[in-house]
Amino acid sequence: MKIIADSAIPFLRGILEPWAEVEYLPGTQIAPDRVRDADALIVRTRTRCD
């Protein structure tokens, strides 16, 4: 399983890694081409998801 997560979410690092491949990105770098093959997306309320 591949998860893309906003790197600004506190206390998230290390929690999901035993079960999934997690890529942490700044919210400004989360774009359709980066998340196309992801199974899950974890973002903050500030991140636009169009």
Image (spheres, rainbow, N blue to C red):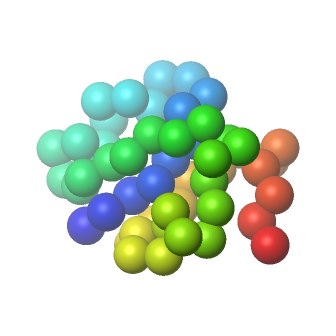
The residue shown at (62%, 53%) is 30
In front: 26, or 20? 26
The residue shown at (31%, 63%) is 2
Quadrant location of residue 24? top left
In front: 20, or 29? 29
Q: Is residue 13 above or below residue 40?
A: above
* 28 left or right, relative to 5: right
The residue shown at (71%, 43%) is 28
The x, y position of residue 20, in whole percent, is: 23, 55
* 13 left or right, relative to 10: left
Q: Residue furthest top?
A: 11
The residue shown at (54%, 33%) is 7
Q: Is residue 16 above or below residue 12?
A: below
* 49 left or right, relative to 25: right
Quadrant containing the C terminus is bottom right
The x, y position of residue 15, in whole percent, is: 32, 35
Q: Is residue 28 above or below residue 41?
A: above
Q: Is residue 25 above or below residue 42?
A: above
Quadrant containing the N terminus is bottom left
The x, y position of residue 32, in whole percent, is: 61, 71
Q: How many marks?
A: 0
